[in-house]
Image: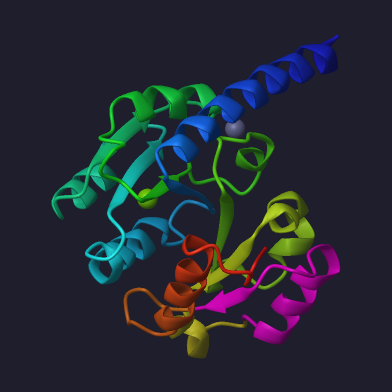
Amino acid sequence: MEIKVLKNILGVNEQIAKENRGLLDSKGIFALNIMSSPGAGKTSLILETIRKLDSEFKIGVIEGDIASSIDAEKIGAKGIPVIQINTGGACHLDANMVSSALKNLPLDTIKLLFIENVGNLICPGEFELGEHKKVILLSTPEGDDKPYKYPLLFRIADVVVVSKTDLLPYLNFNMDNFVKAVRTINQKAPIIPLSAVKGLGLGDWFSWLKGVLTGGKRNA
Ligand code: MG
Ligand code: ZN
């Protein structure tokens, strides 16, 4: 019985996600669903992307957190339209939450929408939000074996970002092992190592982003 209920919930979610996608497409907005563990650097990467690309592609942000508006305040301080969703305990965003947020964003002025999911490597992968691409971040302190332990997120990723590469000299993280782990379940997604804080590797991230934004075939 429980399995049946879960299927129904996901079925309703898929329907609302389709409606979100239709709304985004009608406004010409490209949306990214960013997923990672807590503290992997989602907000830092969004902030660096705003700094570099907002003049070219007007950016909007939906921030998902269980509580607080700390991340939304950081984004809002840059003059970027942002909506904070507090899930009140839920460990992922769902399409209905995103639908409400979309009603409160100036959709006519946004070209690129970041949806920062709740920090969690597990169930956010189960819920379509209406996004065009899924971005998975893994920070180097988390370890290079995580694709084996949390396969769903790495399997559905359109791009895998390895964050905090400036810490590599202090860690056992082995990039070759990580790439190998990702490739056992996902042969296509580009893997982009970077450090948002130190400004390393961001060029590869920006060119991936521009590629998907301009309808490039980089990650079709
Ligand atoms: Mg954050
Ligand atoms: Zn969850």
Relative horizontal placement of residue 154, taking residue 171 as reference (left or right): right
Residue shown at 23%/51% (left/top)? Answer: 75
Whether residue 180 appears in magenta in the rendering, the answer is yes
Decide if residue 189 is in sight here. yes
The C terminus lies in quadrant: bottom right
Looking at the image, residue 178 sits to the left or right of residue 141; the answer is right
Is the residue 192 above or below the residue 115 in the image?
below
Horizontal side of 219 relative to 101 (left or right) equals: right
Instruction: Examine the rendered structure and indicate whether residue 16 appears above or below residue 60.
Output: above
* Residue 147 vertical position relative to residue 74 in the rendered view, above or below: below
Q: Residue at x 56, y 36 (%)?
A: 130
Could one spot residue 92 in this view of the protein? Answer: no
From the top left corner, tell me how far across and down residue 76 is, in percent. Answer: 18, 46
- Choose top left, top right, bottom left or bottom right for residue 184: bottom right
First to last magenta residue range: 173-193
Q: Position of residue 59 (x, y in %)?
A: 30, 53
